Amino acid sequence: MEFRTNDGVKIHYYDTQTAGQPIVAIPGIGGYSRMWLKVAQLFKKDFRFILIDPRNQGQSERTYQGQRISRHALDLAELLQKLDLQQVIGIGNSMGAANLWSYLSLFGSKRFCAMIDLDQPPKMIRDETWSYGFKDLTWHNYPEYLKVDFGNPFFARIDEEMFDLARQEARDFPYQPSDNYLCLIDHAHQDWRDVLIDIDIPLLVLAGENSPLFDYHFALAMQELSPLIEAKIIANCGHLIQAEQPREMYDEVMRFLNSYKGSD
């Protein structure tokens, strides 16, 4: 499925079109939808599961336009409006979580009831105010450091069938990091702590204990920003929690959602 944004870019998305409360999932930069296959199968029993391919990746259009997080948030807003979604559970891996926070800062939480962050701190650059950034990124080496090949984001073995499907997707729809370099610069520059301090919906932060990109202690620091933020560490897991530990992710999200409903 696809739609055209108000700046004319084709955005592709998957939609189970099943009954139930909507979940809208957003991959990280360069991520492929097939890495969400196992998680989508778990959630679609009780939820309508929707996955968006951000511009410049997956089956969405390659374009020079909109290489900034705010434009990605607007793409999300247009999809929510197109599908007329309410009471949405937003799930973002890596930069996908930043897209959700950007949406909150621009449009508020009206369409959402909860959000889940998969291994993304609110601030990427380490400095005297924040110790848990992206690897060794500081103001001294930003943005040149972002050109480095950071290698494999996995830690745990990924289901072979799902991995093969993701590799085929990558062959059919190749991703070029240069297409998104300006977006990565913008992503790394952001600090979402002001948004999270004032968040008015529950946020679950899941951090991979063995993530090669982030120190998992960032999740515990985020928990201190607001009483609506809860942190959990996923053992034997790297950066792609949805692909490496789909069952554990599903169980934690369901526990979180059920506890939230129980407190209503």
Image (tube, rainbow, N blue to C red):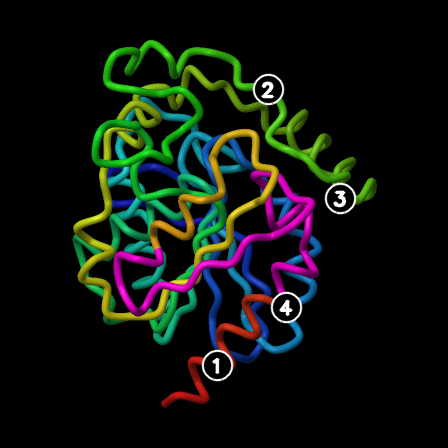
Amino acid type at image mark 2: Gly
Q: Nearer the viewer, residue 90 or 19?
A: 90
* Residue denoted by label 2: 151
* Residue denoted by label 3: 162
Extent of the magenta region: 223-250
Numbered disc in front, either 2 or 1: 1
At 23% from the left and 69% from the top, the residue drawn is 200
* Residue denoted by label 4: 251
Mark 3 or mark 4: name the one nearer the start of the chain: 3
Amino acid type at image mark 4: Asp
Q: Position of residue 109 (x, y in %)?
A: 24, 67
Q: CA distance from mark 4 to mark 1?
A: 12 Å
Amino acid type at image mark 1: Ser
Q: CA distance from mark 1 to mark 3?
A: 31 Å
Say left or right for 241 vs 87. right
| Magenta stretch holds residue 50 | no
